[in-house]
Image (cartoon, rainbow, N blue to C red):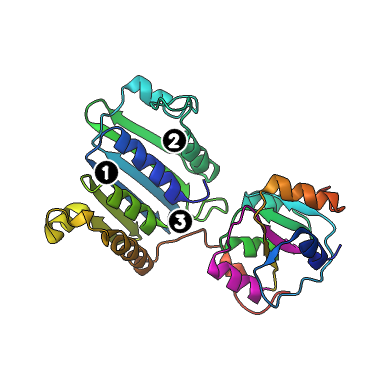
Amino acid sequence: MKLHELAERLGWELKTKNVPVTGEVKSGYASDLLSDVLANSIEGDLWVTRQTHLNIVAIAVMRDLSGILLVSGAEPDPDTVEKAIEKMIPIFRTTLPTFEVVGRIYQLGISGKR
Amino acid sequence: MLELSLHILDLVQNSLRAQASAVEIQIQEDLKKDLLTIGVSDNGQGMSPEIVKRVIDPFYTTRTTREVGLGVPLLKEAAERCGGHLEVHSEKGKGTQILASFQLSHLDRAPLGDMGETLAILIAGNPGVDFLYDHRVNGQAYRLDTREMREILGTGGLEDPSIFAFIRQDVQQGLKKIGAATFPQIMDFLQGPETR
């Protein structure tokens, strides 16, 4: 499923204007521990996290992730948004907590199989 | 906890519950040693050696409102996860000192958070308590001492509603000036031209 389709169906807010959201999402990973994401995410994963600081963009670039979804209404830091736009990493926001939003993503056919 | 300032807030609240009238918060960033240390010291009731041994146990607390106190165990876990450790020194009737260290550049080291807001909450909410905040980055220091502030502002100066905004702004600007590391610096990777 395309990233923008997921976002539209689940009502996520895009925080990174003008960053393309047409990429295909085949899998996802949920974690708030950056070293864990660096070690265990795979290319193209949609990353679900509560972390908001600049380093999430670095991890997304290093692992070539399809995007970042911030949960529980967390707002990205202003410099996080700025760097994400520069590096073309889409960041979305949802008010739902991790457990709930991951369940809804899974129901749409996106799994976390490694 | 997502930010170190929340750990510090929790430690200082423990100090205040232990009836401390003076609390010192010391943060040191040593870039050469790649080390971040956080120390919170108070002149509160202190703890017996037996209780000090139990304070990192998540099922121990002096509070009666809930069974477990998680602040110190969580800080210990956070420090150890980032290549550091936690020490508790305390003496009954004299006070308590808690020291936590972290590898400064560790990927999982939580961001410092908003120390300006944290200190503003603590000072404005406890105008009768003496707070000293000392933050050093490779020898450069930012320092906030409420005893000095009281001398300048006079009696009741810390109870003025405008003190909250003043403290928050002063700390934020002071930390920026000394180059305090708000989060681990792995962004060198991201410098330069577009990567995608």
- Distance from label 1 to label 3 (Cα)? 20 Å
Does the CB distance between marks 1 and 2 fall below 8 Å?
no
Q: Which residue is mark 3?
A: B113
Label 1: state its secondary structure. strand
Q: Which residues are magenta?
A: A62-87
Q: Is residue B20 above or below residue B141?
A: above
Q: Which residue is mark 1?
A: B23
Q: Residues within 10 Å of mark 2 (few under 14, many from 20)?
A: many
Q: Is residue B123 above or below residue B182?
A: above
Numbered circles on residues, count: 3
* Mark closest to the chain's N terminus, 1 or 3: 1
Evaluate whether residue B88 shows in this view. yes
Which label belongs to residue B38?
Answer: none
Q: Nearer the viewer, residue B67 or A33?
A: B67
Amino acid at pointer 2: Val
Residue A72 colored in magenta in the image: yes
Label 2: state its secondary structure. helix
Q: Residue A111: give x, y in percent of width and height.
A: 83, 50
Q: Nearer the viewer, residue A59 or A96?
A: A96
* Mark closest to the chain's N terminus, 1 or 2: 1
Q: Residue B120: give x, y in percent of width and height.
A: 33, 55
Q: Which residue is mark 2?
A: B72
